[in-house]
Image (cartoon, coloured by chain):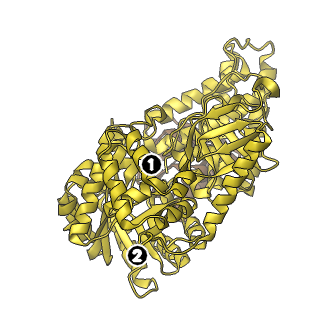
Amino acid sequence: MSTDVAPAPRTVATPAPPADAVAPGTVITGVGAGRGAVVAPLAVLRAAPAAPADEPAPADPAAARTAIDDAFAEVASTLVARAAAATGAAAGVLGAAASIARDPALRADAHARVDAGQGPATAVEGAVGRFVEMFAAAGPLMAERVTDLRSVRDRVVARLLGEPEPGVTLDRPSVVAALDLSPADTAALDLDLVVGIVTELGGPTGHTAIVAGQLGLPCLVRATGVTALADGTVVALDAGAGTLVVEPDAATRDAVGRRAARERALAQDTAPGATADGHRIALLANIGTVEDAHRAAASAVEGVGLFRTEVLFLGRTDAPGLEEQERAYRDALAALGGRKTVVRTLDAGADKPLAFATQPDEENPALGVRGYRLVRTSPALVDGQLLALGRAAATADGPDPALWVMAPMVSTPAEARDVATRARAAGVGTVGVMVEVPAAALLAREILAEVDFVSLGTNDLAQYTMATDRLRGELADLLDPWQPAVLRLVAETARAGLDLGKPVGVCGESASDPLMALVLAGLGVTSLSMSPGAVPAVRFALRRHTRERCAALAASALGAPDAAAARAVVLAGADPEVADLVG
Amino acid sequence: MLERRVIIASASGLHARPASRFTQAAADCGHPVTVARPGQPGVDASSVLMVMSQGLGHGEEVVLASDDAAAGPALDALVALLEQDLDAQE
């Protein structure tokens, strides 16, 4: 998961437009993530207000200092109360923010700025800005403190300006609208009351979409104008169609209701994944935590195809100990009750900075020391994790080794051999690597000769093939997994697996697209791992096609001139019921 | 001016939770206390932001100081705190 330290864009607060500013029936288009649909009132996540550029000097500096102290104290006590009510990582984040809100140096700096003639909100922004600069210069270790500082600043400034608290307060099941949702924003949401998510920024493989997928929520990103809608506006959000309809009429409500009902019906089918002629394609879940493992175990999946272990360690300043890791892995395995579980070793760096593993001062972290390359700088961290995994595997139940281990960001057969050597020395029985660098796809045969299996990470494979940052929403068309160049690398890898008789999985988001799932099955991919919420539609699509027909669809996609044509040709050739399902 | 010297025992240095524990204790002790690398100007030991901005690592020596002549026992208590591995106490 990405840790987006950038705060939501800040705007000078303007009153919300009247509810009738957008005509009923207006359709806002975006990029859908997942397939769900829902009709519900909108709750807009309020952007933090910024100090007005012309905030006057305080007439009474002593009163302004008191106002600043009061605002910090109120924010601190609110945060303490929320931390007490929260659990786990959220409690830690809120507690850290509370201790910053109580900081005497921060208040003293703001006081000095008031005495020098600044308005109180401007003074608080300046004081926080000084520490943000100081911490930003200190490298990635301090990145989370920068997020905390900004969150405190936004709350204190809002109080000083008499604006409502930034964020969103839910009192009924709602679709949450925001410019963008940071992990901190998501952590603050009452997920029991969130029935959909729509953002103006972000991409379909970004943090928001991934979180929505894990929660099984309909999600629309790049939906321009949604935050201008009034709180409480009823909307019909259809992730499959990529639309949001404002104040939908009865027909639209019915259509969305039917789609939601069909999704529920699909979820009733819990048989193992297979084509119409019985060729098995394992349908697996992507997880990041032990809680995710419990959720996945409750859904109809055959196991876990991607356990992102770095999620266990985000927000930590120190590497977790051997026992702590072993316990987490054993708990996840126990939750899954002997089902196959593919654990990915630490994928730190780039958009997933870990304080204890991320290289400081990388100009280009996506191309730097990330994934398995960590072994070059912190071999003990890699070996420690493998040892913990080996021990967890040794104590896990089941006739076959349920625990498979794979390393991310491997580029060469020599690296794959190193993974296999270290993992086997640590007691791991089944060892693989991820194919997410074009070099690895091109040498899939040589790499598969070194390990037991490979798994394609299609998000990163598309990023590195197309030289396109996953976080740049405006380049989403280049990141399309239907890009012929990406499909060919997938095909190359799958063919190597077929030839060597070794499993080739896909654990990127493209596995969750029912049409793409047909192509992947046709290419020879043996398992598909995705958000559990995406499994029913993929299962349905596979069941409607023979393996031979999947192979024909794959061949037509590979022959298409561009991404849109590749998808279109598969859509045209797929079973009509599946075509209707994906729209 | 009272001074004490101590080696930071916490595995991650004076960062995150150890810094929180230490600054909270400094704030609660009732005396003005500064913390610094030897020979450098001290910063307010009750400010978690100032303390973290020093980037004090595991095994580094720091000087705790107070202008308050009555702060001796408080400084001793803070020294005892820094002599523990606060990372290990979770």
Of the numbered discs 1 and 2, the one sitting upstream in the chain is 2
Q: Which mark is residue A403?
A: 2
Q: Amino acid at mark 1?
A: Ala
> Please, what secondary structure does the residue beneath circle 2 have?
strand
Q: Amino acid at mark 2?
A: Leu
Chain letter, colour brown in render: B
- Give residue A59's quadrant in the image: top right
Mark 1 residue crowding within 10 angstroms, few (<14) / some (14–19) / many (20+):
few
Q: Residue furthest bottom?
A: A399
Q: How many marks?
A: 2
**CA separation in Å, label 1 and label 2:** 39 Å
Can you give x and y, in whole percent of width and height, for residue A155 in the image?
Answer: 71, 35
**Which residue shows up at 70% across the image and 37% down it?**
A245
Can you give x and y, in whole percent of width and height, for residue A170 in the image?
Answer: 78, 46
Chain letter, colour yellow in render: A
Q: From the image, tell me which residue sits under label 1.
A: A572
> Please, what secondary structure does the residue beneath circle 1 have?
helix
Location of residue A57 with respect to B54 vertically, above or below? above
* Residue A355 seen in this snapshot: no
